[in-house]
Image: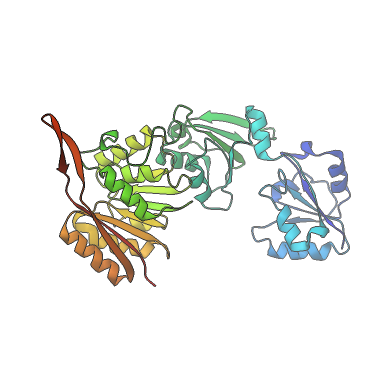
Amino acid sequence: MIPVQVIGLGMSPEDLPSRSRAIIKAAQVLVGGKRLLGYFPEHPAPKITLAKDLTETLLQIKELARTQRVVVLASGDPNFYGIGPRLARALGPDQVVIHSNITAVQAACSRLKIAWQDAALISLHGRDWEALDRALGTATKLIIYTDPDHTPARIARRLINRGWESARVCVLEDLGQGTEQITWLSPLEAQTRQFSRLNLVVVLADPSLPPNQGLTLGMPEAAYSHQAGLVTKSEVRAVVLARLELGPGQVLWDLGAGCGSVGIEASLLIPQGRIIAVEKDRQRAAQIQANRDKFGVRNLEVIGAEAPQCLAQLPAPDRVFIGGGGGQVQPILVEVFKHLKQEGKLVLTAVLFETLQTAFEVMHRQGYEVDCCQLQISRSRRLGSGTSMQALNPVWIIAGRPGG
């Protein structure tokens, strides 16, 4: 078998070194995407266009390489979100020679005069939003490969939903082409704009909003903007977060989020996770956003809708906290169990016997192991020339996890 040559074109054939040009010129078969093959219209070799499903093409390449010099063209660097490793796995590493070139990331940072070693590099090409959602929790600089389903406008709308309205967005179109264009925008401006299909997005967080600024576990209630005392008490918050057993990269639903205090402090424990605060009251939802932005929390998304109706549209959770719900607790629990991941855990607070009873009944019916504790908190206060203790309402914390 003649080793298959994989050539990274960089941004265009102008980035090719002489050795790579010579290999392409000597090719007996050229393989690549339609755009890349279009750079070589005069090349006499037969051309094979890469499709989304590579399985058949890889078999064809393997067969042709038995007797012919096959050259595979790749954009940027074949080893950076490219076809190089896939070919090496399919044909064997000894049967593939990879020729590196500059990536779109390198080219973009060169144009913008910024470093890229401290950036979160994300490809949404043919993927879901998970990598971007994780990065929004901790990164201050993001470089994003897009595709027709993950456009700059949709990325901008996602930034807005996650509290990144003050970020700076740069869309680099047609890098290395005669039509190259670089545009700086705010997320609000970018969400309605259309761009060339060939683009890369750079996002820079607002430097005046460092992540989790001043935020600690068990913040006093006065630290949060809240409505008529609708805030989980700091002691209860601390126990709830412990019972949730939060871990890296998890998705947390905070249902009936009130002012968002539990979800906001959870960001300290899952900085690369995703927190979704659901609150039906518009004023309280706005307070969650204000509290999120005050503390620079970047991985909390506010959903202004009513549970359980909105839950089917959310990503499946690893953990769920229900701090509100009123008379809807039972249907909310039933819906939560339809989406909670197999090893997921649910924590609920209650001040009413009826809520406690409902939670136990629904969780036991679901086959969950349930444990409960009651917090009876008293806080010191000045009384005359001394100090007394003032009791708060007792709160039950019910935790459930899969049985067996």
| Quadrant placement of the C terminus | bottom left
Q: Residue furthest front?
A: 386
Rendered image quadrant of residue 244? bottom left
Residue 237 appears at what percent x and percent y?
30, 46
Q: Residue at x 27, y 60 (%)?
A: 372
Residue 81 seen in the current view: yes
Q: Residue furthest left?
A: 384
- Decide if residue 257 is in sight here: no
Image quadrant assignment for residue 297: top left
Nearer-the-camera pick, 140 or 191: 140
Number of numbered tags placed on the structure image: 0
The residue depicted at 45 percent of the width and 39 percent of the height is: 159
Q: Position of residue 168 (x, y in %)?
A: 50, 30
Which of the colour schemes (rainbow, by chain, secondary structure, one colour) is used?
rainbow
Q: Position of residue 100 (x, y in %)?
A: 77, 44
Classify 35 as above or below 176. below
Quarter of the N terminus within the rendering: bottom right
Of residues 148 and 168, the one drawn nearer to the viewer in this rendering? 168
Against 294, residue 304 (above or below) is below
Where residue 192 appears, as percent x and y from the top left, is: 46, 37
Left or right: where does residue 199 sit relative to residue 218? right
Which is nearer the eye, 267 or 274? Answer: 267
Does residue 60 lie above or below 167 as drawn? below
- The residue shown at (16%, 48%) is 393
Q: Is residue 299 left or right of residue 114?
A: left
